[in-house]
Image: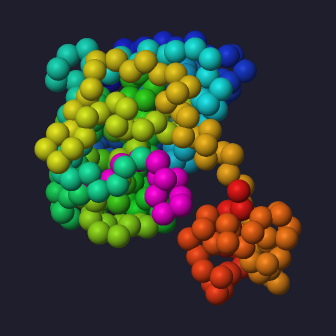
Amino acid sequence: MIKVFSFCFILVPFSLLAFPDSLTVNLNSNYEGKLIEKTWSNKDSMVFFPAYDLYGGFDQAQIWGVKVDQTKKVDTTTLKLLHDSCDFHSPSIGRLTSGYGWRNNRPHYGVDIKLNTGDSVRSAFDGMVRIARYSSTYGNVIVIRHNNGLETLYAHLSKRLIKEGDEVAGGDLIGLGGNTGRSYGSHLHFETRYLGEPINPSDIFLINDSTFDVRQDSLFLSSKHFSFLKEVRKIKYHRVRRGDSLWKISKRYNVSINKLCRLNKISRKKTLRIGQKIRYN
């Protein structure tokens, strides 16, 4: 039986929406137990796919295909997180090993939770699996779109237990913890995003060694939740080309070699690689 989703409708400028005439999506057949492909009309899609109207589709090609700049957001959007106490389940409980923000001079758009390879990872809320695949950076990764438009990401899994198009409930087992992709040590990398833009999970959840729970039943989303992105987007990088040196880069951008070394946490003797990104502001 197809589950009918309830929506938290949010007004966005019509220009942000680009509805296709129809949507072809991979779904899991309830009666055959295997992956099938089905084409839906817009009318059907509005009902079947979570927040289809908000995103203008259900993109299964890219992990973060839709990105609408939220740093310039002028209003407040209310996202209902809980209608009942059983609507949320902690994805995993363990020590917070890395938070949202700057890490090793790079932006870290989620939180890392310590776990052991093979530990259970569960869906935080009801929703539908948009992405379930292997990524060179995220490793085995799952992205779930929830009924209110929020999306959650679960990365570095040792095994995925669900497929794209699956419907899930909060607390459903979706994968096993691991150390795949660009990862050092077994952990769960967990992200929360809205229209493709990352939100600090700690703004939504209370996370510590023994707790992973929703702070309140609604999230009042405003531009302040995206202030880190504004900071990140001010940063400029130079991509190293053949013949470049720290001295040449410093002269080009009128910045000292000492500052380049400090910003990039490198020494003056560092050998630059072609294609390497060097921050200069």
Magenta stretch? 101-113
Question: For the point 52% across and 15% down, which residue is it?
Answer: 76
Q: Please tell me whether the stretch drawn in magenta is mainly helix, strand or loop.
A: strand
**Which corner quadrant of the image does residue 41 belong to?**
top right
Question: For the point 72% across and 62% down, which residue is it?
Answer: 280
Q: Nearer the viewer, residue 66 or 46?
A: 66
Q: Is residue 244 left or right of residue 89?
A: right
Q: Nearer the viewer, residue 105 or 43?
A: 105
Q: Nearer the viewer, residue 219 or 155?
A: 219
**Which corner quadrant of the image does residue 173 belong to?**
top left
Is residue 213 in view from this perspective? Answer: yes
Residue 212 position within the rendered picture, expressed as x and y whole percent measured from the top left? 21, 38
Q: Is residue 1 above or below residue 239?
A: above
Q: Is residue 158 above or below residue 101?
A: below
Q: Is residue 269 left or right of residue 50?
A: right
Q: Nearer the viewer, residue 164 or 86?
A: 86
Residue 259 position within the rendered picture, expressed as x and y whole percent measured from the top left? 67, 66
Q: Is residue 223 magenta?
A: no
Residue 185 position within the rendered picture, expressed as x and y whole percent measured from the top left? 29, 69
Q: Is residue 250 above or below residue 26?
A: below
Residue 268 position within the rendered picture, expressed as x and y whole percent measured from the top left? 65, 82
Question: In what quadrant of the picture does the C terminus appear?
Answer: bottom right
Q: How is the image coloured?
A: rainbow
Question: In what quadrant of the picture does the N terminus appear?
Answer: top left
User: Which residue of the protein is positioned furthest toward the right in this rendering?
Assistant: 252
Q: Is residue 257 left or right of residue 86?
A: right
User: Which residue of the protein is positioned furthest toward the left in this rendering?
Assistant: 210
Is residue 48 in view from this perspective? Answer: no
Q: Is residue 110 magenta?
A: yes
